[in-house]
C-alpha cells in the first residue's frame, strides 16, 4: 500500500466537516427537545410522569429567554404558553435565515 500523505488542505476539510456535523447534531437535539416540550404541553400530559418531567426540565432552558417577554405566560394550546410556541417556531425556522442569507454567485 502507498502511504497516504496528509496535507494542510485535507486536514482543514476534515475539521470543517467535523464542525458541520457537530453543529447539525446540536441543532437536531435542540429541535427535538423543543418539539417534545411543545407536544407534551399541548397534549397536557401530567407532570407527575417521570418522562414528562424529564422532558420539561431538560428543555426549560430553551424556552427560558422567551418567558421574560410580555404575554409569554399566556396559554395557547393545552398547557403550552406563548413562550414555548415561540421558542419552537424560532428554532425550527432558524435554518431559513442561513439559507436566505446565502448569495448566489
Image (cartoon, rainbow, N blue to C red):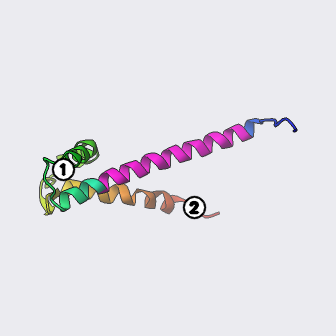
Which sits in the foreground, 46 or 96?
Answer: 46
Percent x, y of residue 98: 48, 57
How many neighbours does mark 2 have within 10 angstroms: few (below 14), some (14-19), or many (20 or more)?
A: few
Magenta stretch, main secondary structure, is helix
- Which residue has dot 2 on it? 103
Mark 1, secondary structure of its residue = loop
Name the residue: 14% across, 58% down: 79
Magenta run includes residue 16: yes
Percent x, y of residue 48: 13, 47
Magenta run includes residue 34: yes
Name the residue: 23% across, 44% down: 64
Residues at discs 1 and 2 in contact (Cβ within 8 Å): no
Mark 2, secondary structure of its residue = loop
Quadrant containing the C terminus is bottom right
Name the residue: 15% across, 52% down: 70
Which sits in the foreground, 10 or 104?
Answer: 10
Percent x, y of residue 15: 62, 39
For residue 2, the mark is none
> Relative to 11, is 2 on the left or the right?
right
Give the mark nearest the N terminus, 1 or 2.
1
For residue 69, the mark is 1
- Residue 7: which quarter of the image? top right
Q: Nearer the viewer, mark 1 or mark 2?
A: 1
Distance from disc 1 to disc 2, alpha carbons, whole Å, reads 33 Å
How many neighbours does mark 1 have within 10 angstroms: few (below 14), some (14-19), or many (20 or more)?
A: few
Name the residue: 39% across, 48% down: 29
Quadrant containing the N terminus is top right
Can you say whether 28 is above or below 58 in the image?
A: below
Percent x, y of residue 63: 25, 48
Q: Magenta stretch?
A: 10-35
- Residue 11: which quarter of the image? top right
Amino acid at each position: 500500500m502507498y502511504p497516504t500523505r496528509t496535507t494542510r488542505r485535507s486536514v482543514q476539510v476534515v475539521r470543517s466537516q467535523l464542525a458541520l456535523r457537530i453543529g447539525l447534531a446540536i441543532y437536531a437535539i435542540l429541535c427535538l427537545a423543543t418539539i417534545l416540550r411543545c407536544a407534551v404541553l399541548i397534549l397536557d400530559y401530567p407532570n407527575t410522569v417521570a418522562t414528562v418531567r424529564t422532558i420539561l426540565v431538560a428543555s426549560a432552558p430553551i424556552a427560558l429567554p422567551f418567558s421574560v417577554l410580555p404575554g409569554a405566560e399566556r396559554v395557547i394550546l393545552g398547557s403550552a404558553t406563548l413562550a414555548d410556541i415561540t421558542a419552537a417556531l424560532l428554532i425550527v425556522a432558524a435554518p431559513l435565515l442561513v439559507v436566505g442569507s446565502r448569495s448566489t454567485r
